[in-house]
Image (tube, rainbow, N blue to C red):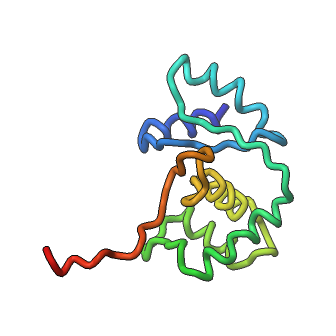
Amino acid sequence: MEMLDRLLAWHGRLRPRLIGIEQNGGYALIRPLLSLRAGGGFVPVRYVNHTEPKELRIERLSPEFEAGLWLFPSNPGPGVRVLQEQLLNYPGGFVDGPDALAGCSELLPDPVAPADAAQPLYRRLGPRSDFAEL
């Protein structure tokens, strides 16, 4: 219940558009309890059922890190410092932070994946036209 209270307090303070929660394992207990604890209020939760090993999900982040796509604050707070330590020590030590980060990456939309065959969600810009005449 303490975890749910913290989740609801965090939601009230930051108002995220989406919260991802693992649906498998021990976190399966959160779903029914969160509905009760929220008291009918809306909490934007997407429950994720992982089917791949944790290690594979974490290692899939490597190309993004190597490309410099993940940025961290210059003066990180204690939670971010713990995450950085876990990332730097991977695969040794605790992997909960890197696994949660991999979960965040999974919740983000693929920038080029189509929602359906007719209309993609995102697109890349084509080459610039010649604007010399403007």
- Left or right position of 28 against 118: right
At x 43% / y 40%, what residue is drawn?
15
Marks counted in the figure total: 0
Going by the picture, which residue comes out furthest to the front? 133
Seen from the viewer's position, the closer of residues 96 and 123 is 123
Q: Give 66 or 117, whichever is nearer the viewer.
A: 117
In the picture, measured across the screen, residue 131 lies left or right of residue 74, that is left
Q: Residue at x 71, y 24 (%)?
A: 32
> At which x and y percent is residue 40?
54, 17
Image quarter for residue 96? bottom right
- Quarter that holds the C terminus: bottom left
Left or right for 12, reference 84: left
For residue 9, above or below residue 32: below
How far from the left and from the top, in percent, is residue 123? 48, 60
> Which quarter of the figure is the N terminus placed in?
top right
Residue plotted at (44% across, 36% down): 12
Which residue occupies 54% across, 79% down?
68
Q: x, y percentage for residue 41?
A: 50, 22
